[in-house]
Image: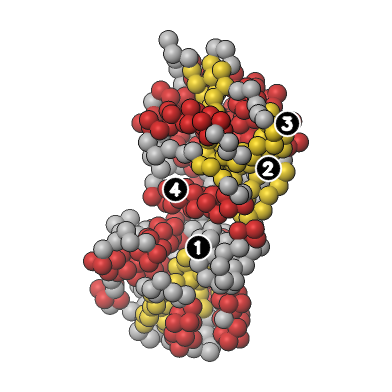
Amino acid sequence: MNKIQLSKSEYIMFLKHPAWLWLKRHDKKKLPEPDANLQAMFDAGNLFEGYAEKRFENITRVGFENYQQYLDMPARTQQALSGGATVLSQGRFEADMGEYSITCIVDVIEKVEDKTFDLYEIKSSTKVKPDHIEDLAFQVLVLEGAGYSVRNVSVIYCDNSYVRHGDIDTDKLTASEDVTTQVRSKLESTKRNVVSAVNTVSQPDVPDMTPRRAKLGGYREWLDIFLSINPVDDKYSIYNLAQISAEQLGNLEDMHIGTIVDIPDDFHLKPVQKRQIEATRLGEPIVDINKITKFINNLEYPVYFLDYETLASIIPPFDGLRPYQQLPFQYSLHILRAPEADLEHVEFLHTLETNPLPDLLSQLQNDIGESGSILVWYEGFEKSCNDLMASMMPEYKDFLISVNERIVDLMIPFQKGWYVDKDFMGSASIKNVLPVIAPELSYKDMDISEGATAQRLWMEAVYTDKNSEAEKTKLMESLRAYCELDTYAMVKIFEFLLAINQSGSINIKDTVINKDFEQQSLF
């Protein structure tokens, strides 16, 4: 029987949930494949890694491009070190631990003296995280098990205070933090955990899969995996309680409670969970008509419905940007100039590999008048975009300040619990609210159905050669349709609240906004 070898990534899987590792080894098809958005995150990490490696001179890269090269990595790593390499990236080491072996690929090691290294882990995050320490503790265990010594251990991460001006300054884009003490303090527990991980791989049956066992930041991701493997027939099960924590889930499982309606009144709950449970028990919406009326009556016509789509990158593409900052490249704007007016729609979409702001802001200033309420969904996002644009283009600062002063968050009635439906599932996301309030509208059949995909596809189309001209044209139409639906969804939700205000009830049969729009729109 072959000796079990445990890799660094498998060890981190085990720490997040033992069943995760077991499934990876014994029933991998049950684990989701990385989707395109997750792959884009990996690609961003690889891009940052290239910049971080520039901190080192005369670096020798080992790496691999296929499985055979992966198998050859330990030998090629030793060849590079024997050949005089003093700084090595993407080298692979193995340590024989008797009944099993452990292996890791290091990001960077720097030779201090013969068989003694400083170890660096490169992460595209903006700070050191607990899983980075666990990751490095495993690497130290491998290196020292292979007969080497590790002097200092550091994490190189992204400094998100860096603002681009001209060419990328690697020293300012990256930051380094010494974590030797934290890593050393984890070595004994790492040794024990490695043994437990190997034992998990060896056992014939999958460990208890309950999400309550998830740790190290893996809870939400594992909950999704758990529910995909173990679908729950009851939509109102405890696993669909909004913002449920691992501790809450564990307590409910121990109490043998399976559905939301059976959760005891004295159970410790967040306000949003209490509202969800109450609405589920009632079986009908919970409505605070007075607060909704006040909200609607405080709006000023013309009413604008605004939504941005944004680009973002760990490497700022334009001067004035920091890593990961969200910069608008598109907007959709619906306009209702008076209660009985026809609904209007205007839009902007940048399609060139240039800074979108000059054209976007010029048109936005023309499209939005100087008065009237501007409705958005989650005002923190749009306002932060406006603040960023004002800093990058000061000539529009006064205009953008005035826009922010006029913004009203349409999410508030749902976020505050003024209107709660059991089928919102405790969420105030427009993706959860819209299907309940306007079931005739849906994101499901659209080519683009959420913001992360919109961002990724636009950046691929504009910054890479992955798309033909025909594909790019089709993609831009899909982006227009998606962004338009975001603002039209707000129109329909506004219409719903307006009807509550006018009728004093939620038995709404008539609509208020122009009925012809659905036939005229792109979707």
Q: Which residue is mark 4?
A: 38
**Label 2 or label 4, whichever comes before in sequence order:** 4
Q: Are marks 2 and 4 in contact (CB under 8 Å)?
A: no
Residue 329, percent from left and from top:
44, 72
**Residue 33 can be seen, yes or no:** yes
The disc labelled 4 sits on which kind of residue? Answer: Leu
Q: Which mark is residue 400?
A: none
The tag earlier along the polypeptide, 4 or 3, is: 4
The x, y position of residue 227, in whole percent, is 44, 36
Does the residue at mark 2 contact the one at mark 1 (Cβ under 8 Å)?
A: no
For marks 2 and 3, give the one nearer the viewer: 2
**Mark 2 sits on what residue?**
154
Point out the frontmost of discs 3 and 1.
3
Q: Secondary structure at mark 2?
A: strand
Residue most toward the left? 470
User: Can residue 246 be seen in the rendering of this structure?
Assistant: no
Question: Given the image, on which type of amino acid does mark 1 rest?
Answer: Ala
The answer to whether mark 1 and mark 4 are in CB contact below 8 A is no
Q: Amino acid at mark 3?
A: Arg
Tag 1 residue: 312
The amino acid type found where label 2 is placed reads Ser
Q: Give how far across and how far down residue 256 sits, in percent.
A: 55, 28
